[in-house]
Amino acid sequence: MASEQSRAAPPSYALWNILAGLVFTGIASIAAPSVGLEVSAIFGNDQGEITWLTFSIGVFLTGTVVWWRLISATHRFSIWRGAVAGVYVAVLSYPVVFSLAEIFQRNWNESSDPGTFVDRIQHVLLVSGLSILTTGFAAVLLMAVTGAVLGWAQRRRFPEAATIARTEPLRRRGLLRTLLRITSTIAVALLVLLAGTFSLASIWPLDTAPLGFQATASEPAADYSDAIAAFDAVAASEARYDLHPRCHSTLLSHGEKVHRAVVLFHGLTNCPAQFDVLSRQLFDLGYNVYIPRLPGHGMADPMTMALADMTAEDLVATTNQAVDIAHGLGDEVVVAGLSAGGIMAAWSAQYRADADSTVPIAPFFSPHVVPTWATHAAASLILAAPNFMVWWNPLEPFPSEEMDYAYPRYATHALGQIMRLGQAIDEASRRAAPKAIGIAVLLNDADLSVSNAFTRRVVQAWQANGHEITIENLPASMQLPHDLIDPRQADQNIAFVYPILTDMIGGTTPPPIRN
């Protein structure tokens, strides 16, 4: 009878398993913002965003199961074992939470391609791995402390547990001891590995020195004819590539230099077609509008690997060339861009004194899952890791008919290079005031693709250096997508967004409307 009793955990242990899951969930909910997890309160979203429901269920299930298997099932309650369990809860919660969001917050049943299941697992592992390697050490430490407290409390509550553990059959006891030693060793190794990886990545230089402004690399067009000659050279260069018909660098010109010229930089994996409707509206207001094609973008083959080789230096060169051309198109130059293009607009704001106005739109300084203090480490890790091609949405592995010019995949190194350029701007913003005359920033509070917190940090640095910045925040209640520009983007609302952008680009002295 005693032997049978020793092999079963007392019934009240089940309550402690549940309690442990609830405590881990509560602590994780409080800590989520500091470790970079932005959790949506909109439970009906279908974009794969983490909601408080999927977050809470994921952490609770992970915490309960881990506590049951490592603590309650062994009848060994201690501070050390509780800390080990906490480490595993922290590490395993990431893929569990991201998987639940992927399953329940996307239109899972719309996919008939069995290959997309593997692609979605790859996406979960990629996001989980990046999150764990950058901020995981902080989550591990917090959960380890939480587990240690729970282990201490459960030992105080069940002092007889030590006797139960000692009376287990020798064979089972030996196996459990071996497993616990292995588990403890792995947990400690994980903590050391994560902390070490983050520390190394945080101090690893990103080589941002070449990303500043070099006067010798800039030749502003002297007049309209110089600008047209420079644009023709760009067009001739692009003729060597097999580009999508709608993705060539585009110039909307009134045939002469006007009061104001606008440069529009498109986002990552899109092309100049992204701005075709907005550019026409600006043209009708009297602007000359230039939309350059970003390096590696716009190829006719949507499965191209051209993005894999894009560098931050390429983006700087494209930015300089575009601003130089714009000087021959207008007496004043306005530089605007979305996402990756928003970083190029921010670079113009920081370095180009001849940019009269700059309008970064939802600039991509960092992914939203990475907090500002971990962005340098994230960029270092992305660039140090192998270069992967990753689906934006595994449910749509091929471009839609409406947006067949946009790539369905991005290169992880291209993402890292954009972040590297963002780091250069961040560093420069703290050293010196921005050179552009006017700066207006558009943020989307519903955006879960980019880090608005990082953008605000750069804006605050600009303001601290005595520059006045205009900030427009689109409310989260609008539930606008990250791509605010492309009229063919799902959930788009250009009727709301375009007038705001037109006002920001026009500033306080809009150009005269041409007849």
Image: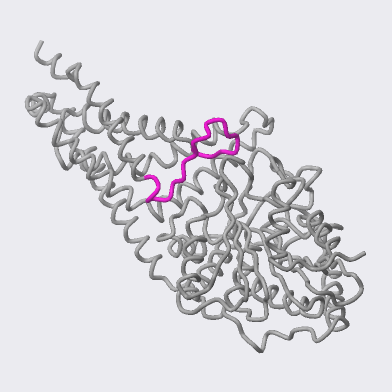
Q: In this view, does 124 lie above or below 419?
A: above
Q: In which quarter of the image is the C terminus?
A: bottom right
The reply, left or right, for residue 67 in relation to residue 284 is left
Check residue 270 for magenta coloring.
Answer: no
The reply, left or right, for residue 131 in relation to residue 314 is left
513, 82: nearer the viewer = 513
The reply, left or right, for residue 248 in relation to residue 463 is right
Location of residue 324 by image quarter: bottom right
The reply, left or right, for residue 110 in relation to residue 378 is right
Check residue 42 for magenta coloring.
Answer: yes
Residue at point 44% right, 73% down? 205
Q: Give the range drawn in magenta.
A: 32-50
Q: Is residue 391 above or below residue 259?
A: above
Q: Where is residue 251 in the image (x, y as percent from the top left)?
A: 84, 68
Residue furthest to the bottom: 216
267, 430: nearer the viewer = 430
175, 363: nearer the viewer = 363
Q: In which quarter of the image is the N terminus?
A: top left
Q: Is residue 331 above or below residue 166?
A: below
301, 428: nearer the viewer = 428
Q: Where is residue 304 in the image (x, y as percent from the top left)?
A: 73, 57
Q: Position of residue 166 (x, y in %)?
A: 8, 28
